[in-house]
Image (cartoon, grey):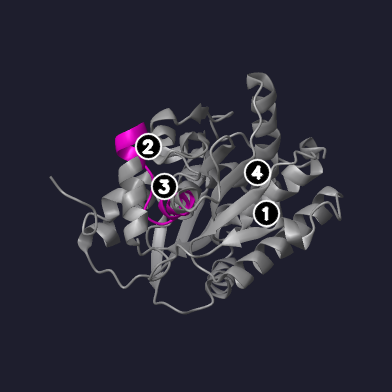
Amino acid sequence: MHLSRFPRIRLAHLPTPLEPMPRLTALLGGPELWIKRDDCTGLSTGGNKTRKLEYLMAEAMDQGADMVLTQGATQSNHARQTAAAAAKLGLDCHIILEDRTGYNEPNYRLNGNVLLDVLHGATIEHRGPGLDMNAELLAVTETFRAKGRRPYAIPGGGSNATGALGYVNCALELLAQMVDRGISFDHMVTATGSAGTHAGLIVGLKALNAQLPLLGIGVRAPQEVQEANVFRLAQAVEEKLGTQGVVSRKDVVANCDYIGQGYGIPADSTLEAIDLFARQEAILLDPVYSGKGAAGLIDLIRRGHFKKGERVVFLHTGGAIGLTGYTHVLPHA
């Protein structure tokens, strides 16, 4: 796939660990569980967006940008990693944060990812719910351009064809680790939201003929919307790589039964998943993405969708710093 043709700035600690989860496996009594630790990418507590930012920030620098802008929810892991990448590269960063939960608790509005945004030097403005946030992003970008700046706009989640290259590369990395360990997986599971991680992975896995089915656990949109968004982006990634046609519509699968009341609002199953991973494997999930992805994995094991004798790998997308913004819903001592 010649990923070396595309500009890239190394920001992540790679390869991320690939680890078994024996205690959780024994507790659930189903398939053998493994985890791909993309919470360990290193940049400002890590997370999956760092892989995308390696390509996005390189493109920004190639275009002569002197600042980057992006958007996300209040406790956006992507915004935090973008602010960190900009600080590391000496670029200004401006973030638009959308209220998607209605939470007014001080920790939610000021702690966690928001605190780190500020520490990394980003400037922030806020929006209410229900707007077209990428349209808001482009409008704000133009105001900076009119002032003589050279802005580079990064869509929510870093999820465009450039950013998704980071997860094509992750598919390469995972298969190399499987070969090195002498193991194979029957299924791969991850959270799916802005679509870049899901789309990049499915393009990489299919282009490599990995024969590894990928299931995305939705965190925001209904199934038909989520699958359509992922497939559309996968097609854009294929066009960028010159691998058109390796991904068919049936390859893109999302289960959106674990969203609960909405994006960024943990369901009871989310909180259970956070508790089980923390107590059984000393792994911290976040309340928005990885917690809901893990909740789907756990429930599907209990329902027999993933069976004993199979081996399943869960991609951890990171974001545990967001736990400190959710103290109003998490258990206390």
Q: Is residue 154 visible?
A: no
Q: Give, as a three-letter code, the residue at label 1.
A: Ala
- Is 234 or 76 nearer to us in this picture? 234
**Of residues 269 and 226, which is closer to you in this image?**
269
Identify residue for label 1: 199
Report if the CB atoms under discs 3 and 1 are less than 8 Å apart. Answer: no
Q: CA distance from mark 3 to mark 1?
A: 20 Å
Q: Is residue 304 above or below residue 36?
A: below
Gap between marks 2 and 3 measured at Cα: 25 Å
Amino acid type of disc 4?
Gly
Work out whether mark 2 precedes mark 4 in sequence or the reverse, and give the earlier one.
Answer: 2
Query: Disc number at residue 319?
Result: 3
**SS state under label 3:** loop
Question: Where is residue 104 drawn, in percent x and y?
Answer: 24, 69
User: Earlier along the polypeptide chain: callout 3 or callout 1?
Assistant: 1
Which residues, given as a range, are shown in magenta? 277-297
Return the residue at label 2: 27
The residue indicated by pointer 4 is 166
Point out the residue furthest to the left here.
333
